[in-house]
C-alpha cells in the first residue's frame, strides 16, 4: 500500500459512554492559529473544538463531517516557504 505523509488531521473522540468519561480532540495543523499564516483566522474552529472537549456538544459542522474524508495528496495544504 502507498503511504501518504503530511496529512492534516481532525478527530473528535468520546472515550466511553459513562457520565464521567472524557473526550479527546486531535487537530494536526496548528498553522491555522499561527499569525504568520493567517489568511483567515480559524479561532472559530478552536472554539468549537474546546466546546466539544469540555461539554460534549458536537457543533453541526462536525456532525455533517462524521465520516472519514480522504484527500488527494496534491490537494493538501503546503508549508509556507521559509517556515520550519
Image (cartoon, grey):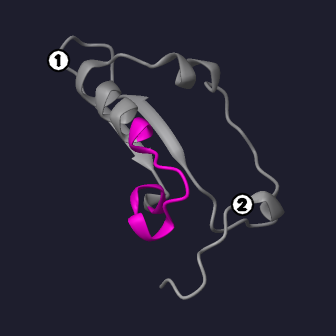
Q: Is residue 60 above or below residue 48?
A: above
Is residue 32 located in the magenta-colored stretch of the structure? Answer: yes
Q: Is residue 51 above or below residue 38?
A: above
Nearest-to-viewer mark from 2 and 1: 2
**Mark sitting earlier along the chain (2/1):** 1
Provide residue 25's location: percent of width, then percent of height.
38, 39
User: What number is the disc on residue 20?
Assistant: 1
Mark 1 burial class by Cα count in 10 Å: few <14, some 14-19, many 20+: few
Asked where in the image residue 15 lies, by quadrant, the reply is top left
Which stretch did the figure color magenta?
31-45
Asked whether the viewer can see residue 53, the reply is: yes
Q: Is residue 16 above or below residue 11?
A: above
Provide residue 61's location: percent of width, then percent of height.
56, 23
Asked where in the image residue 53 lies, by quadrant, the reply is top left
Provide residue 10's location: percent of width, then percent of height.
52, 44
Is residue 18 located in the magenta-colored stretch of the structure? Answer: no
The residue under the point 63% across, 60% down is 7
Asked where in the image residue 50 lies, by quadrant, the reply is top left
- Where the N terminus falls, by quadrant? bottom right
The residue under the point 59% across, 76% down is 80
Amino acid at each position: 500500500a502507498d503511504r501518504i505523509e503530511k496529512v492534516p488531521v481532525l478527530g473528535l473522540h468520546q472515550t466511553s459512554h459513562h457520565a464521567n468519561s472524557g473526550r479527546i480532540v486531535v487537530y494536526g495543523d496548528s498553522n491555522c492559529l499561527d499569525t504568520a499564516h493567517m489568511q483567515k483566522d480559524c479561532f472559530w474552529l478552536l472554539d468549537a473544538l474546546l466546546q466539544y472537549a469540555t461539554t460534549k456538544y458536537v457543533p453541526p459542522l462536525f456532525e455533517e463531517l462524521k465520516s472519514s474524508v480522504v484527500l488527494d495528496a496534491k490537494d493538501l495544504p503546503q508549508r509556507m516557504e521559509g517556515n520550519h
